[in-house]
Image (cartoon, helix red, strand yellow):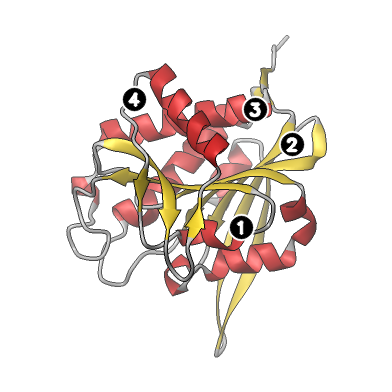
Amino acid sequence: MANQFQNDGLNVSKEKVDLGSGQYTYNVIGQINGTDSHRYIIIGCHIDSPGSSQGAVDDAAGVGIEMEMAQLLGKDVKPNETVLLVGFGAEELWYNGSDEFVNQHPDIVANTDAMIDLNAVGAGDTVTPIGQSNLPTPVNAAPQLLDLIQQSANTMGNPVSVGGDAYPSDAYPFYNKNVSVVEVESQPFKVSPMDSSDSSTNLDLNNIQQMGETITLTILNLTNAKQIVKK
C-alpha cells in the first residue's frame, strides 16, 4: 500500500502501532497536499481482517478503493484541503490504529473538516453511509456529510441508502472531536465479513466501482478540488 501510494506521487509515511507483548502493526498514510496545508480531509480503511476470513470485504476492497483514489487524485488534482488516505492497522482489535492516529496527531484531528471511513465494502446492493452506531457508545454521523455522500451517489447514478451498524470501525475515535464523521459500508452484506465466505470470488466489482465513484466525488466536492492542467 505504501509503495503504491509513493508510485502515485503521494507523500507517504508508515507509523508503528504498538500492540503490546512485542507485537506491532502500522498505519499507512498517503498525503495529497492541498493549497491549505493546515486543513485536512481523511479517508480511512483498515489493513487487517478477522482471523476467521480471507478479508476481501473486510477490508481489502476498502484498501483497493483507496489505492485507486491515490492513482486518480495524486498527480492530476489540487484540492483545497490536504487529503490523507490512511490504512489503519489493528481495526479488528477495537480500532487500535485509528485510536493511535488520533492520540498521536491532535493537531491534524483538530483541523480535520471530514473523516470518511470505508469498512466492509464491495459486496452489497447500495453505497450505505452509516447514520448511527451503538458500540462501545452511541455515535451519530454528521448530517451534512451524509447528505453530501447521498448527493454524490445520486449524481453518479449509484444506489445509496443510509443504514445502521453496531460497530463504527475506525471512525469511532474521531467522533466527539469536532470532526464531521461517517462510516460507509456496502449493505445488505451479501457475504459475512466474519467467515470464509469473505473471499475475493464473492466481491461485487460493480459495487466496488459505485463505492469508489461516490466517495471520490465526495472528496472532490469537499475540497473544491481543481484538475491540474499539464503543459
- What residue is disc 3 on? 75
Mark carried by residue 33: 2
Local packing at callout 3 (Cα closer than 10 Å; few below 14, some 14-19, many 20+) is: some
Considering only vertical position in the picture, is 90 above or below 4? below
Mark carried by residue 80: none
Foreground mark, 4 or 2?
4
Q: Are marks 4 and 3 in contact (CB under 8 Å)?
A: no
At 65% from the left and 24% from the top, the residue drawn is 77
Q: Label 4 vs label 3: CA separation?
A: 26 Å
Label 1 or label 4, whichever comes before in sequence order: 4
Q: Label 4 vs label 2: CA separation?
A: 29 Å
- What residue is disc 4 on? 158
Residue 185 coordinates in the image, percent (x, y):
37, 46
Q: Is residue 173 left or right of residue 203?
A: right
Query: On the rendered image, what quadrant is the C terminus found in?
Result: top right
Label 4 or label 2, whichever comes before in sequence order: 2
Label 3 or label 2, whichever comes before in sequence order: 2
User: The disc labelled 2 sits on which kind of residue?
Assistant: Asn
At 71% from the left and 42% from the top, the residue drawn is 40
Q: Are marks 3 and 2 in contact (CB under 8 Å)?
A: no
- What residue is disc 1 on? 174
Label 3's element? loop
Q: Is residue 5 left or right of residue 207?
A: right
